[in-house]
């Protein structure tokens, strides 16, 4: 088996007295679709923030594709191939949807000639293709601030996707999306990810979605990974049933 | 395209009126070059940041022109380039530090830097002429030697050409990837970073561009006035640049020049008719603008244009 795509060794971080990450040793192999579950405050988002450079761990190391990326800033980690979407969508509210996507695409191509129009600096086909993939093509000319929450979420994911990452990390991609659209969204997303052979990791509360789309599941309790394995097995684990499912 | 018509009108008026009414030359030259500095402030407003210290770059370039003129007796064209370069270098250095800050901290740090420059210029009077400033002797321009009137006419047309060119370049910059990233600083720096783009580097580029525009305006203004004083870098002057940006409207480059022209003439006439209270007139004008046309004079013009276009359609 090849080296893991993402690996953390002994990650520790505490906010005051609250332990958010407690000696986390974790590996993610290329091609996996990992779901992360856990109650609020279990350390899920903190872990994502440490992996993407937003927070620095007090101890421990993060490796991406065998390379030590501990302590690097988010933009450097992003350039290495880890893209991310957020629980609260991070979009450019005063740009149109298409401009947001073009700006994201331009980041990959590094064309910063200040006299060359943005729309000529990027691969427009790829932008349009990604917009269609997440069903936002019809809203491409609207200001991003006009989108409802669910579509903001899609735009946020699409902006990460157009970076052509090797690993896509999504923090609750379906929260805020109305429940009858959730499965449609996850279907398209997962199709896009397998089309581009992107490894993914997503925080999710909807157990139905987890069992349907994830190839592996980790359950977090008190800053630790309490259970790790195929979704069906993890969901039966007594610790998970007690602490995560609230059973 | 209402603004294109407005641009043509402004350029035509600026190019012809002073020929028939010679006393207009100096105020028009000064208005255009003030407009260049305001354009610099507009670049930063694009990123959602307001600098209350940008007269520093106008002032620095003026002194660079004065020194270069005194010691090397250079041509006017070279002096303008030298003044602009001085501002670019200063902006690039101060920018390294200042692009880490946003909002009120960014605004006030610019004031702080500008007041340091102001104090140096006032205190070291042996080298800088103190508050009396330095004379800038009329240099030859592009190889030709001019009398006062000819020199002013030349500067007028040079200013107009540079202003049009600068406005076009700034509009192109705004539409480019760097310019759009600059505008994105206003709404979401986190996302910029997570696209792999350094918000600080993008902002630094905008900051240097804004210093360059202020320097360009400051250099030509120094030549036109034949004098530079520390007063050009005083914080009140920086405030004026922001004032004009709001008056003209920050959505389009032309707003800077429209605002600057209106400002110059309101000041001129208000000073003549209500001596000592021209600030009162300007203040009132700004309050009216903010209430009636939050997007500035340019906003008024485009709204008027849209209203007319709508009328034709129906």
Image (cartoon, rainbow, N blue to C red):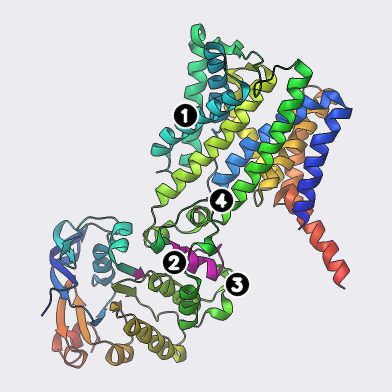
For disc 2, the marked residue is A105
For disc 1, the marked residue is B113
- Quadrant of the image occupied by residue B40: top right
Say if A61 sits above or below B98 in the image. below
Please name whichever residue, A154 or B70, is drawn nearer the observer in this view of the structure: B70
Question: Mark 2 touching mark 3, by CB under 8 A?
Answer: no
Q: Are marks 1 and 2 on the same chain?
A: no
Question: What residue occupies the far top of the structure in this picture?
Answer: B126
Q: Is residue B97 left or right of residue B47?
A: left
Q: Specify few, some or many for label 4: CA neighbours under 10 Å numbering under 14, 14-19, or 20 or more.
A: many
Q: Which residues are magenta?
A: A84-106
Question: Mark 1 touching mark 2, by CB under 8 A?
Answer: no
User: Would residue B94 be counted in the magenta stretch?
Assistant: no
Q: Specify few, some or many for label 2: CA neighbours under 10 Å numbering under 14, 14-19, or 20 or more.
A: many
- Mark 1 or mark 2, whichever is nearer to me: 2
Question: What residue occupies the far front of the structure in this picture?
Answer: B143
| Image mark count | 4
Q: Position of residue B20 (x, y in %)?
A: 89, 28
* Label 1 chain ID: B
Q: Specify few, some or many for label 3: CA neighbours under 10 Å numbering under 14, 14-19, or 20 or more.
A: few
For disc 4, the marked residue is B173
Give the numbered dot on residue A141. 3
Question: Mark 3 touching mark 4, by CB under 8 A?
Answer: no
- Mark 3 or mark 1, whichever is nearer to me: 3
Quadrant (top left/top right/bottom left/bottom right) for the C terminus of chain A: bottom left
Estimate the spatial distance between the alpha carbons at disc 4 and disc 2, rounded to whole Å.
18 Å
User: Would residue A91 be counted in the magenta stretch?
Assistant: yes
Q: Specify few, some or many for label 1: CA neighbours under 10 Å numbering under 14, 14-19, or 20 or more.
A: some
């Amino acid at each position: 088996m090849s080296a893991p795509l993402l690996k953390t060794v002994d990650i520790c971080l505490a906010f005051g007295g609250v332990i958010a990450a407690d000696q986390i040793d974790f590996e993610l192999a290329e091609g996996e679709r990992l779901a992360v579950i856990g109650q609020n405050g279990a350390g899920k988002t903190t872990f994502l923030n440490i992996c993407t450079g937003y927070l620095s761990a007090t101890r421990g190391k993060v490796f991406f594709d065998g390379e030590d990326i501990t302590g690097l800033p988010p933009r450097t980690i992003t350039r290495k191939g880890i893209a991310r979407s957020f629980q609260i969508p991070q979009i450019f509210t005063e740009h149109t949807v298409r401009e947001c996507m073009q700006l994201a695409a331009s980041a990959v191509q590094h064309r910063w000639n200040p006299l060359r129009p943005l729309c000529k600096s990027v691969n427009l086909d790829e932008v349009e293709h990604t917009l269609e993939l997440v069903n936002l093509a019809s809203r491409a000319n609207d200001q991003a601030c006009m989108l409802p929450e669910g579509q903001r979420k899609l735009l946020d994911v699409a902006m990460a996707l157009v970076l052509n990452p090797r690993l896509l990390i999504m923090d609750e991609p379906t929260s805020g999306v109305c429940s009858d659209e959730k499965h449609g969204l996850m279907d398209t997303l997962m199709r896009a990810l397998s089309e581009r052979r992107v490894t993914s990791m997503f925080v999710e509360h909807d157990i139905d979605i987890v069992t349907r789309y994830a190839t592996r599941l980790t359950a977090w309790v008190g800053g630790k990974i309490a259970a790790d394995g195929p979704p069906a097995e993890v969901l039966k684990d007594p610790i998970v049933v007690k602490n995560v499912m609230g059973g | 395209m209402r603004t294109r018509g407005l641009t043509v009108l402004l350029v035509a008026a600026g190019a012809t009126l002073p020929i028939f009414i010679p006393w207009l030359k100096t105020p028009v030259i000064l208005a255009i070059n003030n407009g260049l500095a305001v354009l610099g402030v507009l670049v930063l407003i694009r990123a959602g940041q307001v600098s209350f210290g940008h007269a520093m770059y106008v002032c620095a370039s003026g002194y660079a022109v004065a020194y270069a003129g005194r010691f090397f007796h250079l041509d006017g064209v070279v002096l303008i380039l030298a003044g602009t370069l001085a501002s670019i270098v200063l902006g690039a250095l101060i920018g390294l530090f200042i692009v880490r800050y946003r909002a009120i901290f960014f605004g006030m740090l610019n004031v702080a830097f500008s007041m340091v420059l102001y104090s140096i210029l006032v205190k070291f009077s042996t080298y800088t002429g103190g508050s009396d400033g330095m004379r800038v002797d009329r240099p030859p321009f592009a190889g030709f030697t001019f009398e006062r009137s000819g020199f002013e006419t030349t500067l007028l047309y040079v200013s107009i050409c540079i202003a049009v060119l600068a406005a076009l370049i700034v509009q192109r910059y705004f539409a480019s990837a760097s310019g759009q990233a600059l505008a994105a600083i206003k709404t979401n720096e986190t996302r910029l970073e997570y696209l792999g783009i350094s918000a600080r580097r993008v902002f630094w580029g905008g900051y240097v561009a804004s210093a360059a525009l202020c320097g360009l305006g400051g250099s030509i203004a120094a030549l036109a006035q034949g004098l530079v004083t520390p007063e050009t870098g005083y914080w009140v002057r920086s405030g004026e640049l922001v004032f004009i940006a709001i008056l003209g409207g920050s959505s389009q480059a032309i707003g800077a020049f429209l605002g600057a022209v209106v400002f110059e003439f309101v000041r001129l006439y208000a000073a003549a008719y209500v001596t000592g209270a021209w600030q009162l007139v300007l203040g009132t004008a700004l309050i009216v603008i903010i209430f009636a046309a939050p997007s500035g004079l340019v906003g008024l013009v485009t709204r008027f244009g849209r209203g007319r276009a709508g009328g034709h359609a129906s």
